[in-house]
Amino acid sequence: MTSTTPSPTTHSRSQRGFTMIELLMAMAIFAIGMLGLAALQVVSISQGAGGRLRGTAAFLAHSVLDRAGSEGQVTAAERLLNPAGVANTTGGTFIGAADGKPKADGAALLFDINGRPIDAADKVTPAVFTATWFSRQGSVNTGTRSAIQEFVVNVTWQEANPKKGTAPDTKAISVSRHVRI
């Protein structure tokens, strides 16, 4: 009985291995895939940072509205002490007079990257967020000694745009709520 297995020195056509062209093509496809993953990583990091900034901006907008609502309730309580039923226009420091007229009383509040307030005179801490607010025409009910007014808070910030290179985009969020003043 004779053996038909090939010797180690004889190669059949199916056992030749990869050619140099096949190896170069595989490396090119692998390199393109790795470049795609690297680009995806850059976009992912950018979008994560942008999401954090948008979340902080929304939190700041709502906290300014909460402050307006809180001080509005304080001034409403102060108005209840007025026996004549006339709205007390001196109470409150944030929302201004309770006359139902629109006000552009939103001096800008500055905040750092973490949403902490910054004094305008602070030249060391960079201001990332700027919050401004105004109120729209409201209604005053002298019988119940109350008033309601819509407050609008705008928060703006700069956000990097990977498509534009170094030029950041200005982003903004606007939130409104009716506040009892």
Image: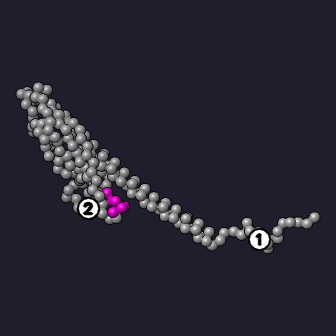
Q: In this view, does 10 lie to the left or right of 130?
A: right
User: How many neighbours does mark 1 have within 10 angstroms: few (below 14), some (14-19), or many (20 or more)?
Assistant: few
Q: Is residue 143 left or right of residue 162?
A: left
Q: What amino acid type should be assigned to the residue bearing mark 2?
A: Val
In this rendered view, identify the residue nearer to me: 165 or 149.
165
Q: What amino acid type should be assigned to the residue bearing mark 1?
A: His
Q: Residue furthest top?
A: 143
Q: What residue is shown with label 1?
A: 11
- In the rendered image, is residue 16 in sight? yes
Q: What residue is shown with label 2?
A: 124
Magenta region, mostly helix, strand or loop? loop
Q: Give the range drawn in magenta.
A: 159-164
- In the rendered image, is residue 67 in sight? no
Residue 42 is inside the magenta segment: no
Give the quadrant of residue 41: bottom left
Who's the residue at 20% across and 36% down the image?
179
